[in-house]
Image: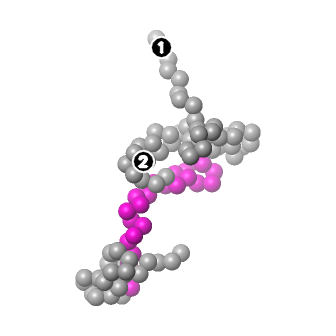
Amino acid sequence: MIQSQAPPVVVPGTGEPPARDSVRGWLRWIGYRVFAVHDAQARAMGLEVAESPTGLRRAYRDPRFHGLAVCVRDGTHVGEAGTVCGRCGARFFRETA
């Protein structure tokens, strides 16, 4: 029976393996191993991958939603920032964090 080895773990963008000289480095290395397939699938679909500081949690976001804003009148309508709401006539403004 032939056993295949997993591909080497590398940090996206750098191509370097994560440092494993500290507890945080080991946790990030484990996170890259665990989420490698999901991260690759998300990037292939055009999603942004946001990694937590510890490396053990991921958030996948669609960049198309960055341009959306909420209606200033009641906050329930959603549209593109800078346009006018078709339901109530108020402008859509982007919330600043």
Q: Nearer the viewer, residue 89 or 22?
A: 89
Residue 80 painted magenta: no
Determine the residue positioned at 47% across, 45% down.
39
Q: Amino acid at mark 1?
A: Ile
Q: Is residue 80 above or below residue 14?
A: below
| Residue that label 2 marks | 42
Most distant residue in the front direction: 14
**Left or right of 17 in this view: 71:** left
The quarter of the displayed image where residue 64 is located: bottom left
Q: Is residue 74 visible?
A: no
For image coordinates 74% across by 42% down, the residue present is: 22
Label 2 Cα neighbours within 10 Å, binned few <14 / some 14-19 / many ≥20: some
Q: Which residue is mark 1?
A: 2
Q: Please provide percent x and percent y for residue 89.
A: 28, 88
Q: In the rendered structure, which amino acid carries the disc numbered 2? A: Ala
For this view, does 51 lie left or right of residue 45?
right
Using residue 21 as the reference point, say whether residue 89 is left or right of it.
left
69 versus 31 height, above or below:
below
Q: Quadrant of residue 77?
A: bottom left
Q: Nearer the viewer, mark 1 or mark 2?
A: 2
Q: Which residues are magenta?
A: 50-72
Q: Residue at x 38, y 71 (%)?
A: 68
